[in-house]
Image: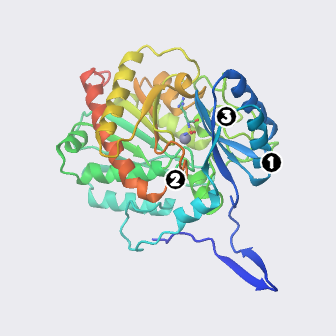
C-alpha cells in the first residue's frame, strides 16, 4: 500500500532569501481562497455571473444554488473581487483562507501505514482496487466483480455486485464521476465493507433483501489525475479536438436531453458536455450497463460532494417528475434519519433544476428517463463549504455513518411506497 504523497520542498537560505524548489509538478493552490457569496436578488446574481465570466481565468465556481455561490479565487483576482462586491453591497464570507494549506493537511497522513484498508485517510485508485480484490476473495459466494468500461487512458472502470439471494430488487451506486469528490469513493468502499460485515439488523436487511451494484470510482482517469497532478480536477481526461483544454464533465455527457440548457459547449468549462453524448467511454459504458440491467434496477444513487443535498429529476427542466411526491417523501426520510444522528447534519432536497441549477445529461436523468429507474438521487455529501471538496479525513467515518442511516431510511420508504418489487415480472 502506498503512503500519502508528500509535496517535498527543498529550501535553500542564501543571504537571507529563501528559494523554494518544488520537487513534484503538482498544481499549487498557494494563496487561493474560497469565498461564500450571498446572493440576495437577481441583480446581484447577474452581476456575479458576469463578473465570474469576465474573470474566468482567476475564478472558478465550486457550488451555486438559489441563495449563494462558493467561488475559488486566485491571489491576483481577490482584491478586485473584494472591491467590486463591496461597492454593490454583496456579502462575502471567506471560507478557506489558503487552499494549498488545506490540501497539504489532507495529504499529510500521519497514521500508521499498515496494509489494512481503513477510513481514516483517502486512498489512490490502485489501493481501492486492491480493497475490492480482497473483498471478492473473502466473500466469493456473495460477491461478483464487473467492469463497465475501459477508460480513455485504458483503466478498467470496476464495480462489485453483492447478492445474497436470487430475485432481489437491485440498487446501483455510482461514485466519483467527478474526480475531486474523494469523500464519495471513501464512503462507497465503507458501504461495501459494512454490507458484508455488519451484524446490525437494518444493515442485514439491506444486504439480504436487495442486490447491490457499486462502482466506487467511475471517472478513474480523472481520479488518478486528482491524486497525482491537480487535487481539484473534476472532468474526464480525454483531450478535446481543436482545443488545448482537456476533459468532459461526465455528469453532462449522458444521452438524455443532452445540452438542452445549462451545460457548456466550451471545452475549457468545468461543465463541458463533450462534443457529443457518450463521447466519454466511461459514460458510454455505464449507460450500456444501466440499459442492459434496467429490469434488475429499482434505485440508482449517484454519490457527489458537496452541499448536503438530495437532488432528484429533472436536471433539464424545472417541471416536476410524475412521481415527485414519492421522491420528496423518500428524500425526506433520508434527511430525517441523518438529522437524528448525534452529528445533527442537515440535508435539504428538491429537484435538480429547481433546488440547484440546470444540469442536463446527468446520470440521474439518464437512469430516470432512459433506464426506467424511478427512485434516483444525486446525493451531495458533506460539507456545506467549510472545506468543500477538500474534506478532512476525520469526516470520512461520520459521513459514512450518515450515509448508512440515510440509506436504510431511503430504501425502507421506497419499499413502503411500492418501488421495490422485482421489475417486469
Ligand atoms: O453539477 C453537478 O453535476 C452536481 N453538483 S457537483 O457539485 N457535485 O458537481 C449536481 C448535479 C445534480 N443534477 C443532476 N444530476 N441532474
Ligand atoms: Zn459532483
Judged left or right of residue 292, residue 80 is right
Q: Do the residues labelled 2 and 1 touch (CB within 8 Å)?
A: no
Bin the neighbour count of mark 2 within 10 Å (Cα to Cα): few under 14, some 14-19, many 20 and up: some
Disc 2: which residue: 156
Query: In front: 196, or 60?
Result: 60
Q: Does the residue labelled 3 lie within 8 Å of ligand 1?
A: no
Bin the neighbour count of mark 3 within 10 Å (Cα to Cα): few under 14, some 14-19, many 20 and up: many
Q: Which residue is at a point 23% across and 44% down the rendered structure image?
A: 203
The disc, 2 or 3, on the residue closer to the chain's N-terminal end is: 2
- Between the C-alphas of marks 2 and 3, the distance is 22 Å
Quarter occupied by residue 193: bottom left
- Residue 244, disc: 1
Quadrant where ligand 2 appears: top right
Q: Which quadrant holds the C terminus?
A: top left
Q: Is mark 2 on a helix, strand or loop?
A: strand
Q: Which residue is at a point 41% across and 54% down the rendered structure image?
A: 396
Q: Where is residue 242 in the image (x, y as percent from the top left)?
A: 82, 42
Q: What element carries label 3?
A: loop
Q: What element carries label 1?
A: loop
Q: Which residue is at a point 49% across and 15% down the rendered structure image?
A: 320
Judged left or right of residue 316, residue 270 is right
Q: Which quadrant holds the N terminus?
A: bottom left
Query: In front: 48, or 224?
Result: 48
Quarter occupied by residue 296: top left
Query: In front: 14, or 338?
Result: 14
Q: Position of residue 390 (x, y in %)?
A: 55, 53
Residue 253 in sight in this render: no
Comparing labels 2 and 3, the label whose residue is closer to the camera: 3
Amino acid at each position: 500500500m502506498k503512503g500519502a504523497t508528500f509535496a517535498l520542498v527543498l529550501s535553500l537560505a542564501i543571504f537571507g532569501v529563501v528559494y523554494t524548489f518544488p520537487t513534484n509538478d503538482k498544481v499549487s493552490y498557494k494563496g487561493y481562497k474560497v469565498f461564500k457569496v450571498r446572493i440576495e436578488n437577481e441583480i446581484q446574481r447577474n452581476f456575479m455571473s458576469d463578473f465570474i465570466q469576465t474573470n474566468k481565468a482567476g475564478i472558478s465556481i465550486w457550488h451555486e444554488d438559489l441563495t449563494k455561490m462558493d467561488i475559488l479565487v486566485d491571489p491576483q483576482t481577490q482584491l478586485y473581487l473584494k472591491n467590486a462586491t463591496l461597492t454593490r453591497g454583496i456579502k462575502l464570507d471567506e471560507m478557506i483562507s489558503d487552499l494549498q494549506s488545506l490540501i497539504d493537511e489532507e495529504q499529510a497522513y500521519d497514521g500508521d501505514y499498515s496494509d489494512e484498508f481503513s477510513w481514516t485517510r483517502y486512498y489512490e485508485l490502485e489501493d481501492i482496487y486492491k480493497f475490492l480484490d480482497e473483498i471478492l476473495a473473502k466473500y466469493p459466494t456473495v460477491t461478483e466483480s464487473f467492469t463497465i468500461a475501459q477508460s480513455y487512458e485504458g483503466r478498467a472502470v470496476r464495480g462489485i455486485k453483492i447478492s445474497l439471494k436470487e430475485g432481489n430488487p437491485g440498487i446501483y451506486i455510482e461514485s466519483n464521476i467527478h474526480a475531486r469528490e474523494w469523500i464519495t469513493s471513501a464512503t462507497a468502499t465503507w458501504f461495501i465493507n459494512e454490507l458484508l460485515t455488519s451484524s446490525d439488523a437494518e444493515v442485514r436487511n439491506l444486504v439480504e433483501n436487495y442486490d447491490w451494484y457499486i462502482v466506487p470510482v467511475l471517472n478513474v482517469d480523472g481520479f488518478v489525475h486528482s491524486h497525482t497532478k491537480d487535487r481539484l480536477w473534476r472532468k474526464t481526461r480525454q483531450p478535446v479536438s481543436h482545443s488545448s483544454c482537456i476533459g468532459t464533465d461526465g455528469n453532462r455527457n449522458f444521452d438524455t436531453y443532452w445540452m438542452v440548457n445549462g451545460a457548456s459547449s466550451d471545452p475549457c468549462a468545468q461543465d463541458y458536455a463533450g462534443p457529443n453524448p457518450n463521447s466519454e467511454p466511461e459514460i458510454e459504458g455505464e449507460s450500456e450497463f444501466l440499459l442492459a440491467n434496467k429490469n434488475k434496477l429499482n434505485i440508482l444513487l449517484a454519490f457527489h460532494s458537496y452541499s448536503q443535498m438530495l437532488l432528484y429529476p429533472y436536471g433539464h427542466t424545472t417541471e416536476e417528475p410524475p412521481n415527485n411526491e414519492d421522491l420528496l417523501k423518500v428524500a425526506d426520510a433520508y434527511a430525517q434519519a441523518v438529522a437524528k444522528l448525534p452529528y445533527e447534519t442537515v440535508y435539504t432536497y428538491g429537484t435538480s433544476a429547481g433546488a440547484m441549477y440546470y444540469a442536463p445529461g446527468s446520470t440521474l436523468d439518464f437512469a430516470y428517463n432512459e433506464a426506467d429507474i424511478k427512485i434516483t438521487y444525486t446525493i451531495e455529501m458533506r460539507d456545506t463549504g467549510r472545506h468543500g471538496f477538500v474534506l478532512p479525513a476525520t469526516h470520512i467515518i461520520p459521513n459514512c455513518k450518515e450515509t448508512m442511516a440515510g440509506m436504510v431510511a431511503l430504501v425502507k420508504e421506497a419499499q413502503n411506497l411500492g418501488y421495490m418489487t422485482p421489475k417486469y415480472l
